[in-house]
Protein backbone atom coordinates (compact mmCIF):
# COMPACT_ATOMS: atom_id res chain seq x y z
CA UNK A 1 0.00 0.00 0.00
CA UNK A 2 0.95 3.62 -0.46
CA UNK A 3 0.24 5.40 2.82
CA UNK A 4 0.17 9.06 3.80
CA UNK A 5 1.24 9.73 7.40
CA UNK A 6 0.28 12.95 9.15
CA UNK A 7 1.83 13.14 12.60
CA UNK A 8 3.14 15.36 15.38
CA UNK A 9 6.85 16.13 15.17
CA UNK A 10 7.26 14.84 18.74
CA UNK A 11 7.37 11.28 17.37
CA UNK A 12 9.55 12.09 14.35
CA UNK A 13 12.57 9.92 15.21
CA UNK A 14 10.44 6.94 16.17
CA UNK A 15 8.21 7.16 13.11
CA UNK A 16 11.18 7.57 10.76
CA UNK A 17 12.79 4.53 12.39
CA UNK A 18 9.67 2.43 11.79
CA UNK A 19 9.09 3.85 8.30
CA UNK A 20 12.56 2.71 7.24
CA UNK A 21 11.48 -0.87 8.02
CA UNK A 22 7.84 -0.65 6.95
CA UNK A 23 6.23 -3.15 4.61
CA UNK A 24 4.36 -0.32 2.88
CA UNK A 25 5.46 2.77 1.01
CA UNK A 26 5.17 5.60 3.52
CA UNK A 27 5.12 9.36 2.92
CA UNK A 28 5.37 11.33 6.16
CA UNK A 29 4.30 14.89 6.95
CA UNK A 30 5.00 16.27 10.41
CA UNK A 31 3.16 19.18 12.02
CA UNK A 32 4.42 21.43 14.79
CA UNK A 33 4.14 20.46 18.43
CA UNK A 34 2.87 23.99 19.02
CA UNK A 35 -0.58 22.92 17.84
CA UNK A 36 -1.03 21.19 21.20
CA UNK A 37 -1.34 24.63 22.79
CA UNK A 38 -4.71 25.09 21.11
CA UNK A 39 -6.80 22.01 20.38
CA UNK A 40 -9.32 24.00 18.34
CA UNK A 41 -6.61 25.24 16.01
CA UNK A 42 -5.05 21.77 15.92
CA UNK A 43 -8.35 20.38 14.64
CA UNK A 44 -8.59 23.04 11.92
CA UNK A 45 -5.01 22.57 10.75
CA UNK A 46 -5.23 18.78 10.75
CA UNK A 47 -8.42 18.86 8.70
CA UNK A 48 -6.74 21.14 6.15
CA UNK A 49 -3.84 18.71 5.77
CA UNK A 50 -6.17 15.70 5.56
CA UNK A 51 -8.28 17.39 2.90
CA UNK A 52 -5.17 18.24 0.86
CA UNK A 53 -4.05 14.60 0.54
CA UNK A 54 -4.08 13.28 -3.03
CA UNK A 55 -6.60 10.46 -2.78
CA UNK A 56 -5.58 9.15 -6.18
CA UNK A 57 -2.04 8.59 -4.92
CA UNK A 58 -2.59 7.17 -1.42
CA UNK A 59 -4.57 4.17 -0.23
CA UNK A 60 -5.13 5.44 3.32
CA UNK A 61 -4.26 8.33 5.64
CA UNK A 62 -2.53 7.44 8.91
CA UNK A 63 -3.03 10.03 11.65
CA UNK A 64 -0.20 10.04 14.20
CA UNK A 65 -2.07 11.66 17.07
CA UNK A 66 -3.82 10.40 20.15
CA UNK A 67 -6.99 11.97 21.47
CA UNK A 68 -4.67 14.82 22.53
CA UNK A 69 -7.00 17.02 24.57
CA UNK A 70 -9.78 16.34 22.05
CA UNK A 71 -7.68 17.87 19.27
CA UNK A 72 -8.74 15.14 16.82
CA UNK A 73 -12.42 15.04 17.81
CA UNK A 74 -14.56 16.04 14.85
CA UNK A 75 -11.96 15.29 12.17
CA UNK A 76 -13.58 13.90 9.05
CA UNK A 77 -12.43 11.32 6.55
CA UNK A 78 -13.17 12.43 3.01
CA UNK A 79 -11.79 10.52 0.03
CA UNK A 80 -9.72 7.99 2.01
CA UNK A 81 -10.14 6.33 5.39
CA UNK A 82 -8.24 7.56 8.42
CA UNK A 83 -6.27 5.07 10.52
CA UNK A 84 -5.72 6.30 14.08
CA UNK A 85 -4.11 4.47 17.02
CA UNK A 86 -6.40 4.20 20.04
CA UNK A 87 -4.42 6.40 22.43
CA UNK A 88 -4.94 9.34 24.74
CA UNK A 89 -1.61 10.84 23.70
CA UNK A 90 1.72 9.98 22.10
CA UNK A 91 3.12 8.31 25.24
CA UNK A 92 1.10 5.27 24.19
CA UNK A 93 2.93 5.28 20.83
CA UNK A 94 6.29 5.14 22.62
CA UNK A 95 5.34 2.50 25.19
CA UNK A 96 3.77 0.20 22.63
CA UNK A 97 0.20 -0.10 23.90
CA UNK A 98 -2.49 1.70 25.87
CA UNK A 99 -2.44 -1.22 28.33
CA UNK A 100 1.22 -0.71 29.16
CA UNK A 101 0.61 3.02 29.54
CA UNK A 102 -2.18 2.26 32.03
CA UNK A 103 0.08 -0.14 33.95
CA UNK A 104 2.86 2.43 34.21
CA UNK A 105 0.40 5.11 35.29
CA UNK A 106 -0.91 2.83 38.04
CA UNK A 107 2.61 1.98 39.21
CA UNK A 108 3.88 5.58 39.14
CA UNK A 109 0.93 7.98 38.87
CA UNK A 110 3.00 11.15 39.44
CA UNK A 111 5.20 10.70 36.39
CA UNK A 112 6.21 13.20 33.71
CA UNK A 113 7.42 11.39 30.59
CA UNK A 114 10.27 12.46 28.34
CA UNK A 115 11.44 11.22 24.96
CA UNK A 116 13.81 12.48 22.28
CA UNK A 117 10.97 14.47 20.70
CA UNK A 118 9.77 16.05 23.93
CA UNK A 119 13.32 17.08 24.84
CA UNK A 120 14.22 18.39 21.40
CA UNK A 121 11.00 20.35 20.85
CA UNK A 122 10.06 21.45 24.38
CA UNK A 123 11.58 24.92 24.00
CA UNK A 124 11.25 25.48 20.25
CA UNK A 125 7.70 24.16 19.85
CA UNK A 126 7.80 24.91 16.13
CA UNK A 127 5.42 27.50 14.72
CA UNK A 128 3.59 29.29 17.51
CA UNK A 129 -0.19 29.35 17.82
CA UNK A 130 -2.43 31.23 20.23
CA UNK A 131 -2.78 29.58 23.64
CA UNK A 132 -6.17 28.58 24.98
CA UNK A 133 -7.47 27.71 28.42
CA UNK A 134 -7.36 23.92 27.93
CA UNK A 135 -3.75 23.88 26.77
CA UNK A 136 -1.18 21.54 28.23
CA UNK A 137 1.08 23.33 30.70
CA UNK A 138 4.40 22.94 28.93
CA UNK A 139 7.84 24.37 29.59
CA UNK A 140 7.33 27.45 27.43
CA UNK A 141 4.51 28.63 29.65
CA UNK A 142 6.71 28.46 32.70
CA UNK A 143 9.32 30.86 31.35
CA UNK A 144 9.18 34.28 32.85
CA UNK A 145 9.81 35.97 29.48
CA UNK A 146 6.26 34.92 28.61
CA UNK A 147 4.89 36.91 31.52
CA UNK A 148 4.62 40.18 29.61
CA UNK A 149 2.65 38.47 26.87
CA UNK A 150 0.18 37.25 29.50
CA UNK A 151 -0.09 40.78 30.90
CA UNK A 152 -0.81 42.20 27.46
CA UNK A 153 -3.47 39.60 26.75
CA UNK A 154 -5.15 39.13 30.15
CA UNK A 155 -4.10 42.07 32.33
CA UNK A 156 -1.73 42.27 35.32
CA UNK A 157 -3.89 40.54 37.94
CA UNK A 158 -4.89 37.67 35.66
CA UNK A 159 -1.30 37.24 34.48
CA UNK A 160 -0.09 36.87 38.07
CA UNK A 161 -2.77 34.28 38.76
CA UNK A 162 -1.90 32.31 35.63
CA UNK A 163 1.82 32.27 36.43
CA UNK A 164 1.09 31.06 39.97
CA UNK A 165 -1.37 28.43 38.78
CA UNK A 166 0.90 27.11 36.07
CA UNK A 167 3.75 26.81 38.55
CA UNK A 168 1.72 24.53 40.82
CA UNK A 169 1.17 21.71 38.33
CA UNK A 170 4.66 20.34 38.99
CA UNK A 171 3.77 19.66 42.62
CA UNK A 172 1.72 16.68 41.47
CA UNK A 173 4.75 14.98 39.89
CA UNK A 174 7.29 12.87 41.76
CA UNK A 175 9.08 11.12 38.88
CA UNK A 176 10.65 12.05 35.58
CA UNK A 177 10.78 9.06 33.25
CA UNK A 178 12.81 8.81 30.06
CA UNK A 179 11.32 6.56 27.38
CA UNK A 180 14.53 5.32 25.79
CA UNK A 181 15.41 3.54 22.55
CA UNK A 182 18.71 2.06 21.41
CA UNK A 183 18.81 4.22 18.28
CA UNK A 184 18.91 7.45 20.34
CA UNK A 185 21.50 6.34 22.91
CA UNK A 186 24.08 8.66 21.34
CA UNK A 187 21.96 11.69 22.24
CA UNK A 188 22.66 11.27 25.99
CA UNK A 189 19.05 11.94 26.83
CA UNK A 190 19.39 10.32 30.26
CA UNK A 191 21.79 13.10 31.29
CA UNK A 192 19.28 15.76 30.28
CA UNK A 193 16.40 14.13 32.13
CA UNK A 194 18.57 13.48 35.20
CA UNK A 195 19.38 17.18 35.36
CA UNK A 196 15.71 18.10 35.02
CA UNK A 197 14.79 15.71 37.83
CA UNK A 198 17.50 17.06 40.11
CA UNK A 199 16.25 20.60 39.51
CA UNK A 200 12.65 19.66 40.28
CA UNK A 201 13.33 17.20 43.08
CA UNK A 202 11.91 14.25 41.16
CA UNK A 203 13.13 10.67 41.05
CA UNK A 204 14.66 9.73 37.71
CA UNK A 205 13.39 6.57 36.01
CA UNK A 206 14.07 4.99 32.64
CA UNK A 207 11.75 2.85 30.54
CA UNK A 208 12.74 1.01 27.41
CA UNK A 209 10.31 2.06 24.70
CA UNK A 210 8.38 -0.28 22.45
CA UNK A 211 7.54 0.58 18.84
CA UNK A 212 5.30 -2.39 18.03
CA UNK A 213 2.21 -0.18 17.86
CA UNK A 214 3.83 2.28 15.45
CA UNK A 215 5.35 -0.48 13.36
CA UNK A 216 2.05 -2.34 13.00
CA UNK A 217 0.36 0.97 12.18
CA UNK A 218 2.76 1.55 9.26
CA UNK A 219 2.72 -2.11 8.20
CA UNK A 220 -1.07 -2.17 7.87
CA UNK A 221 -1.91 -4.52 10.76
CA UNK A 222 -4.97 -2.53 11.82
CA UNK A 223 -6.90 -4.65 14.29
CA UNK A 224 -9.91 -2.98 15.88
CA UNK A 225 -8.55 -3.37 19.40
CA UNK A 226 -5.64 -1.02 18.74
CA UNK A 227 -6.68 1.11 15.76
CA UNK A 228 -9.72 3.10 14.70
CA UNK A 229 -10.59 3.01 11.01
CA UNK A 230 -12.63 6.04 10.00
CA UNK A 231 -14.34 5.45 6.63
CA UNK A 232 -14.99 8.32 4.20
CA UNK A 233 -18.08 10.24 5.26
CA UNK A 234 -17.41 9.60 8.97
CA UNK A 235 -15.83 11.65 11.75
CA UNK A 236 -13.87 11.00 14.95
CA UNK A 237 -15.78 11.00 18.25
CA UNK A 238 -14.37 10.66 21.77
CA UNK A 239 -15.55 7.61 23.70
CA UNK A 240 -15.31 7.36 27.48
CA UNK A 241 -14.09 3.78 27.52
CA UNK A 242 -10.93 1.79 26.89
CA UNK A 243 -11.56 2.23 23.16
CA UNK A 244 -10.97 6.00 23.55
CA UNK A 245 -12.28 6.99 20.09
CA UNK A 246 -14.91 5.82 17.62
CA UNK A 247 -16.25 6.83 14.21
CA UNK A 248 -19.73 8.06 13.42
CA UNK A 249 -21.39 9.18 10.16
CA UNK A 250 -21.13 12.89 9.44
Image (cartoon, grey):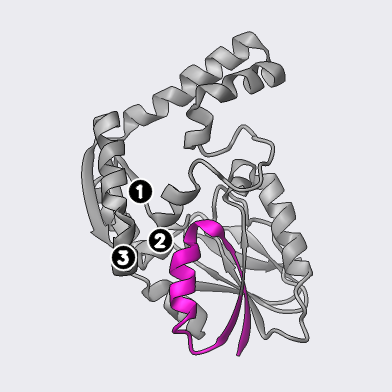
| Whether residue 143 can be seen here | yes
The answer to which of 240 and 9 lies nearer the viewer is 9
Figure quadrant of the N terminus: bottom right
* Residue 142 position within the rendered picture, expressed as x and y whole percent measured from the top left: 48, 28
Magenta span has 136?
Answer: no
Magenta span has 24?
Answer: yes
Q: Residues within 10 Å of mark 3 (few under 14, many from 20)?
A: some
Provide the residue designation for mark 3.
181
Q: Is residue 156 left or right of residue 224?
A: right
Q: Which badge, 3 or 1, is on the more N-terminal residue?
A: 1
Q: CA distance from mark 2 to mark 3?
A: 15 Å
Q: Residues within 10 Å of mark 2 (few under 14, many from 20)?
A: many
Provide the residue designation for mark 1.
113
Q: Residue at x 68, y 18 (%)?
A: 154
* Residue 239 position within the rendered picture, expressed as x and y whole percent measured from the top left: 54, 57
* Residue 52 position within the rendered picture, expressed as x and y whole percent measured from the top left: 79, 69
The answer to which of 247 and 20 lies nearer the viewer is 20
Write the start and end of the magenta stretch as one range. 1-27
Provide the residue designation for mark 2.
92
- Residue 150, image quadrant: top right
| Whether residue 105 can be seen here | no
The answer to which of 87 and 142 lies nearer the viewer is 142
Q: Are marks 1 and 2 in contact (CB under 8 Å)?
A: no
Foreground mark, 2 or 3?
3
Q: CA distance from mark 3 to mark 1?
A: 14 Å
Q: State the residue lying farthest toward the front.
A: 186
Q: Is residue 158 left or right of residue 225?
A: right
Label 2 sits on a secondary structure element that is: helix
Foreground mark, 1 or 2?
1
- Please, is residue 138 above or below residue 232 in the view? above
- Please, is residue 20 above or below residue 41 in the view? below
Amino acid sequence: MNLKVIACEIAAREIYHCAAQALNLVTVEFLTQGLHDNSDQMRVELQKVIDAVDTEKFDAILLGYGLCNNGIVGLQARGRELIIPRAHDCITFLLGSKERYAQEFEAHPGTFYYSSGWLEHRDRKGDRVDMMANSGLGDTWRKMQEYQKLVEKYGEDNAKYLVEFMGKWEQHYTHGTLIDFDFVKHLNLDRQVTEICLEKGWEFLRLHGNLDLLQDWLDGRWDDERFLRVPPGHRVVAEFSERIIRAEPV
